[in-house]
Image: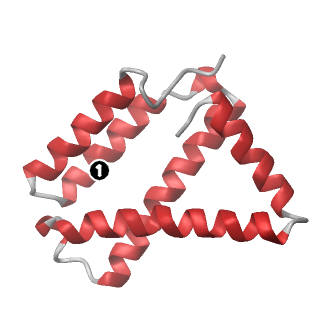
Amino acid sequence: MINTRHTNFFFECIVESRKNPAIKQFLAEMFDIFRASAISLFSKVSAFDFLSDEEKAVLSSLIVAIHEGLELQWFISPEKINTSAALEMVINMLALVSTDENFINTLRKHHEVEKKGKLWRKKK
């Protein structure tokens, strides 16, 4: 979730994790859960059957990297980053490899909920 409250807390945890192994472990587990959720989603969509388990793991890491990179850029220069447009581009990129319209439509519906401000908020 990219918003001032969550993003500030996340970055404070990142900095603290350099000297606190418990926080570092927590963050590692959080990223594991994030990647596992993406892998689970890809595994449920027949359009991604052509990917091996290893390729699904790599794709999930890329999705996490895109999210975290957007979050960092938004945190530094919120006026220069259109997170909504960037996430729409990610959906479009996934649509290039997926022929499952239900999957793409589900992603688009979720993104529409985020754009309405329920999950994504402008930095104050």
Q: Residue at x 42, y 69 (%)?
A: 36
Q: Residue furthest right?
A: 19
Q: Position of residue 118 (x, y in %)?
A: 42, 26
Where residue 75 sits, quadrant-wise, is top right
CA neighbours of label 1 inside 10 A, class few (<14), some (14 to 19), many (20+): few
Q: Quadrant of residue 58?
A: bottom left
Q: Position of residue 100 (x, y in %)?
A: 9, 56
Q: Is residue 53 left or right of residue 5?
A: left
* Residue 38 horizontal/vertical position (percent): 37, 63
**What secondary structure is found at the residue carrying circle 1?**
helix
* As drawn, 16 above or below 26: above
Colour treatment of the image: secondary structure
Compare residues 26 and 18 and report the one nearer the observer: 26
1 and 71: which is toward the camera = 1
Q: On screen, 56 above or below 96? A: below
From the viewer's perspective, is 35 left or right of 53?
right
- Residue located 62% across and 33% down the image: 74
Please state which amino acid type lies under the numbered disc 1: Met
Q: As drawn, is 12 to the left or to the right of 77?
A: right
Taking the image as shown, residue 120 lies to the left or right of residue 10, namely: left
Q: Nearer the viewer, residue 33 or 81?
A: 33
Residue at the spot x=79%, y=69% of the render?
22
Q: Which residue is mark 1?
A: 93
- Number of labels in the image equals 1
Q: Quadrant of the C terminus?
A: top right
Hey, which quadrant is residue 73 in on the image? top right
Q: Residue 78: x percent and y percent?
A: 63, 25
